[in-house]
Image (spheres, grey):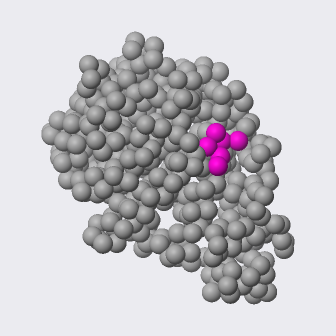
Amino acid sequence: MNRSNKRNQGTYLVDIDPAWKLVLDPENIFWGLLNKDDQGAYLPADFLHLYEQQKKQLDRQLADFRFTTELNSVYIDPTDRCNAHCPYCYIPQEIRKHGTQMSAGLLDEVLRKIKAYFKDSRKKPVIIFHAAEPFLVKELLFDAIRKYRTSFLFGIQTNATLLEKKDVDFMKAVRAGVGISLDAPAKALNNHLRSTGNGNGNYDAAMQALDWFDGYEGLSVITTVTRHNVTVLEELVRVLHAKKVSSLLLNPVRLTMKSAVSLKPDDTLFADNLIRAVETAMDLTEKTGRQIVVGNVANTILAIVAPAARRMMCDISPCGAGRTFLTVTANGDMLPCGEFIGFKEFSGGNISASSIGHALHSDAFKRVRERTVEMIDDCKTCVFRNICGAPCPAELHARGDMYQKARSCEFYKTMIRYAFQLIARDKVQYLLRSDAVRRMEYEYLYA
């Protein structure tokens, strides 16, 4: 970071904008914002005293979060197949067209083994049906949810093309989490990006599903941001807020597949448009009293104000792959993350012939967990390294070397600076879910 200067006892001073300077210890994310008009470039003595009081505890907390947080979620891909043809999909086309579908017997075996692994857990583990299009086998999924709903919390990611009103009623009744894919506020652009063939796409089905869910708090919309839709994010926020959507993810396209590389938006353009989308979301939330939260930006805020509370584990090092979550594919193979589909060298074994514990201790999973920012030349001296995490190891492995900085490095730096600006503007209440804000307590405070 060429705009930071190392200062007292491991802290750095970093320019955030013309009004604010950040003091940050990147090892434990102790931070403070200094108004340049009031403080200039000097750290007050009482601030440094507070830092010394908190340093050891914060060091330990972040290290625990990074290296000892245990498995809490399992992604299950009940089918390899999909009825859409998204140009950036991380699942190889041959697998999407001709892949395996789980039998009822295999899915039951998978869930029994997961339940046994978590038998001593105090919290219910989370099961997310994911991958290609899980609703191709929706009755299989619903039967499993009925049988295991007292053992797990369930979530489903879908393009909504196969959803019926009765399906929505069922998912709401069992309090399942639901993610609906939608890439643009206009039908033509969305259907170009999320095509189902013959000029069609998932736009009408997704919009109908949003009406059926009618503000259901367990619903999120997931958008993959490419160079084609990067300029419509603000309008998408407006459309989804009108549909009573309270949670939206605006995720950068993953470059795991070579075909996705040309779809990557310019970092500066992406940051500018994402910032406008967030400002719009905050404005709508404040004016209407009805929230819409941009989840990936909210997670960056959490990485700053409550580092161990973040739930999206792509932006911590090592990431959550093969650590806090794993993926079971349609044929039972265990992978650190769904992004590793297509890389057989990262299989931790087949769950029918092995166990979750064996996968977690496999060389393949260890290989992913050993990838930390301290081992990446461009990252190890960056003050934002434990806020960003240099995602994504699968993407970077596909691009030739897992031990390189993120392909969207400048974008992440810009968004982290913006997150600190939002905190300085006292906007956290509009950026996080209201229940999360209510649960927060100060661990340290400098005023």
119 relative to 357 in the view: left or right: left
Instruction: Assess whether residue 408 is covered by the magenta stretch.
Output: yes
Residue 86 x/y as whole percent = 40, 27
Residue 402 x/y as whole percent = 70, 33
Range drawn in magenta: 405-410
Viewer-nearest residue: 100 or 202: 202
Residue drawn where x is 64% and y is 49% of the image: 410
Viewer-nearest residue: 196 or 303: 196
| Residue 196: quadrant of the picture | top left
Residue drawn where x is 34% and y is 29% of the image: 192
Characterize the magenta stretch by its predominant secondary structure. Answer: loop
Count of numbered labels shown in the rendering:
0
Tell me if I can see residue 255 in this picture. yes
Residue 180 x/y as whole percent = 32, 41
Instruction: Assess whether residue 128 is covered by the magenta stretch.
Output: no
> Relative to 330, does residue 202 appear above or below in the rendering?
below
> Relative to 61, does residue 226 appear above or below in the rendering?
above
Q: Quadrant of the N terminus?
A: bottom right
Tell me if I can see residue 123 in this picture. no
> Relative to 289, does residue 111 appear above or below in the rendering?
above
Residue drawn where x is 39% and y is 15% of the image: 97
Residue drawn where x is 36% and y is 68% of the image: 283
Residue 273 x/y as whole percent = 47, 52
Viewer-nearest residue: 216 or 90: 90
Q: Which residue occupies the extreme left position in the image? A: 166
Q: Quadrant of the C terminus?
A: bottom right
Viewer-nearest residue: 427 or 402: 427
